[in-house]
Amino acid sequence: MTYDDANIFAKILRGEIPCDKVYESEHSLAFRDINPQAQTHVLVIPKGAYVSADDFSAQASAAEIVDFTRALGTVARQLGLVADGYRLLANHGAHAGQEVPHFHMHVFGGEPLGRMVSPPARV
Ligand code: AMP
């Protein structure tokens, strides 16, 4: 999957559309999901042009990877999610239903989150 500059998170990063920002660092940005799936639902993204976790882990600099990893923890603490727990989730590609082709980690919390994933329907 090649990176598409027209994706919605690239537009957010360029300031072309707004976001509800909760945290920003040199290499990362966190903002609330527009269609929350839990009481707290935030997306943490690297500012660099990476499509997925495997792309990011292979191509990003050590500084970007450290910054992003620290951003995940900072956001969880900042939103008060640590005591009761939270979930991190990243989708990639068709089988995972990735909608936005810019690497992002979902951070869910604020309430019990149920099963980790729904099993696929089998016929
Ligand atoms: P995924 O299916 O993992 O690619 O998730 C993409 C997420 O981006 C979905 O949860 C959407 O609700 C969210 N989303 C799409 N557009 C925006 C936006 N403009 N601001 C915040 N979240 C968005």
Image: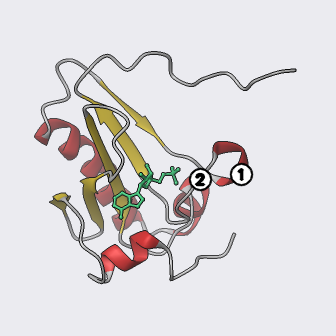
* Image marks 2 and 1: residues in contact by CB distance under 8 Å: yes
Q: Quadrant of ligand 1?
A: bottom left
Q: Which of the image's four quarters has the N terminus?
A: bottom right
Residue 111 against residue 66 in the figure, above or below:
above
Q: Position of residue 14 (x, y in %)?
A: 32, 83
- Please provide percent x and percent y for residue 99: 56, 57
The CB of the residue at mark 2 lies under 8 Å from ligand 1: yes
Q: Quadrant of the C terminus?
A: top right
State which quadrant residue 119 falls in: top right
| Amino acid on which the number 2 mark rests in the picture | Gln
Label 1's element? helix
Residue drawn at (34%, 40%) of the image: 107
Amino acid type of the residue that numbered disc 1 sits on in the rendered structure: Ala
Location of mark 1 (residue): 94
Q: Is residue 31 left or right of residue 46?
A: left
Q: Nearer the viewer, residue 31 or 54?
A: 31
The crowd level at tag 2 (other Cα within 10 Å; few <14, some 14-19, many 20+) is some
Give the side of residue 83 with respect to residue 98, left or right.
left
Question: On the image, numbered disc 2 is attached to which residue?
Answer: 98
Q: Is residue 33 left or right of residue 51?
A: left
Measured as percent of width and height from the top left, residue 22 is found at 16, 55
In the figure, is residue 8 to the left or right of 78? right
Q: Is residue 49 positioned above or below 98 on the image?
A: below
For residue 18, above or below residue 114: below
10 Å neighbourhood of mark 1: few (<14), some, or many (≥20)? few
Number of dots carrying numbers: 2
Scheme of image coloration: secondary structure
